[in-house]
Structure formats: C-alpha cells, structure tokens
Amino acid sequence: MDSYGNNEGDALRLPHEGRAVQAGEIPPVPCESTEGRDRAITSGCVGFTAEEADVVRRVIQTRRSTRFGYSKQKVSRKDLLDIVEAGVYAPSGANLQTCRFLIIDKPSDVQRIAKYRVSWPYITKVPKGGIIKYAPALICVFSDTRIEMRSWSRHNGGVWEQLAPQDAAAAIENMLLMAHAKNMGACWVSAYQNMALTSCLSGWTWGDVLKGHNVPPHFIIQGMIMLGYHAEPWRGEVKHQGKPVKRRPVNEYVIGGST
Ligand SMILES: Cc1cc2nc3c(=O)[nH]c(=O)nc-3n(C[C@H](O)[C@H](O)[C@H](O)COP(=O)(O)O)c2cc1C
C-alpha cells in the first residue's frame, strides 16, 4: 500500500485531473500559476532569514481569539480577500482543495446570523445572543462535497469525511494568522453540519441560518471565523471565561523525539 492508502494495482481517477493515477504514484498538484504563487517565487522567498522566522513565531504566539472590542468599521474587500487567500494556501488532503468560503460583511446579515447561533455549551457567561453580534464580518468555511474522494473512500473507509474537516481547520488557522498579522481581531466560531441537533443553533438548520446567501446544497459547513478591526490598539491581553489565555511550556505537550 502506498502513502495514500492505495493498494497495488488500483487505478484512481482524481476529479481534478481527469486521468487515472497509478498505484504508488503521488498525484500531481493541480497547480495553476496564480499571481500569489508567482510573486512568492519571483521574489525569491524560498529561504527565510532567522528574523523572518521570528516574525512568524511572533504572529503565531501572539494571536488570540478576539470576541469583543471590534470597531464597527467595515472590513475592506482587500483585507477579506487577503485573509481568504491565506485559507486557500493551506494544505489539503491530496491537494483536493475542498474548502469554499462565504464572506458575510453586511451588518444586517451578521446580526441576523447572530440571532440563530447562540453559544458554545461550555460557556456559561455568554452575552445574550452569543458573540457573533460583535463582529463586522464573518467568513464561513465549507467543504465542497463534489470534490470528492468517493473512489478512495470506498476503498479506505470514509477518507473524504475524515480529511475534509482537517482541510477546513488548516484553512481556518491560516486565516486567523493572516488576520492577526494584519492587526485585525478574529475568532474561530464552531459550526458543523449537525449543530442543528444541539442547543448551539437554537434548533435551526444551517439552511435557515444562511438563507439568502446562495450556499449550494452540496456545501457542508465546517466552521466560521468572526473578524474585524480592533476598536482600540490591541495589547494582546485576553481573558477567556475570566482566566488569562496562555500555553504551558512546550515540553509539557511533547512525547517522543531524541534530545
Ligand atoms: C474547533 C474550534 C472551535 C472553536 N469554537 C469557538 C466558539 O464557538 N466560540 C468561541 O468563543 N471560541 C471558539 N474557539 C476558540 C477557542 O475557544 C480558543 O482558541 C481557545 O480558548 C484558546 O484561546 P486563543 O485562541 O485566544 O489562544 C474555537 C476554537 C477551535 C479550535
């Protein structure tokens, strides 16, 4: 079996290629030469300086979930697209690029959604109506189920269903980091298809919540982010549920590896 879980002799036809991939062959990347990628290559950023690595570390370590304190200022289309672009560049299983993004930045639309999406159940002290109502914009992340790996799933027990949420998670984290790098606030907001079965969605379906946004029926919601500019210069001090948000030393999270 190869690293993609295909048995020897299997021929797979990947939807983005239209041709059979032989077992053992790593599927080629469907790489259109996008402007962003070209820019990265021609500007020669294939190697990074230690200072640049430190900037990335700083962006990663200082990012915090912003739930309140947003300015009412409309988020520019450029910022929204830069952030979505960061999501598009996230890795995805077999590079199938399953994620699709819905931008919602009309205040009345955000407020309408805020009325449905109540709160995450572990939070006891949420303001009525949850946190979405504070955000100037939302980006909903979906999996396009037409980009499917059913041929793989059939052989390998539901590969698509397992990988699609991971694709979305990678995209969401990239977007949170890009928003933070642009000095914006953002917060991951739970959203998943069967949330309607929980109190988090007040008994409504995503079809009700996103009515009027022309979400194709074959898109499955995987998560969303709320985002916007900070009302005040952001100092990086965040409390969640009354406690400061921090991480323990790295070695407490690690097992294995040699010293
Ligand atoms: C899968 C996932 C779902 C989340 N859903 C919510 C949510 O619905 N509401 C919320 O306020 N925060 C949500 N968060 C944000 C976490 O609460 C937050 O990342 C965590 O408390 C750590 O804080 P930090 O992001 O400030 O480092 C979610 C995070 C993840 C990864």
Image (cartoon, rainbow, N blue to C red):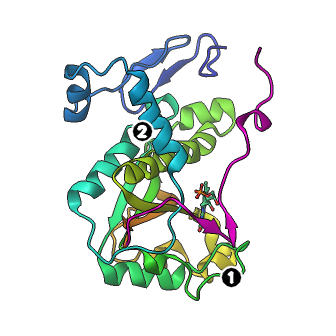
Looking at this view, is 86 or 168 the one in front?
86
Looking at this view, is 61 or 2 the one in front?
61
Q: Label 2 near label 1: C-beta < 8 Å?
A: no
> Image quadrant of residue 231?
bottom left
Image position, residue 136 (x, y; %): 35, 73
Instruction: Based on the picture, tell me whether residue 240 belongs to the magenta stretch.
Output: yes
Residue at x 45%, y 56% (from the top left corner): 141
Check the image and report above or below for 104 versus 88: below
- Quick check: can you spot residue 217? no
Would you call the spot at circle 2 few (<14 residues within 10 Å), some (14-19), or many (20 or more)? many
Look at the numbered disc 2 and give the secondary structure of its residue.
loop
Name which residue type carries label 2: Gln
Residue 125's disc number: 1
Image position, residue 213 (x, y; %): 34, 71
**How far apart, in angstroms, are the residues tagged by discs 1 and 2?**
37 Å
Residue at x 71%, y 74% (from the top left corner): 121
Q: Which quadrant: the N terminus?
A: top right
Image position, residue 229 (x, y; %): 34, 66
Image position, residue 94 (x, y; %): 49, 29
Q: Give the magenta range.
A: 232-259
Ligand 1 resides in the quarter of the picture at: bottom right
Would you call the spot at circle 1 few (<14 residues within 10 Å), some (14-19), or many (20 or more)? few
Residue at x 59%, y 11% (from the top left corner): 9
Residue 30's disc number: none
- Quick check: can you spot residue 28? yes
> Image quadrant of residue 79?
bottom left
> Image quadrant of residue 119?
bottom right
**Residue tagged 2:** 97
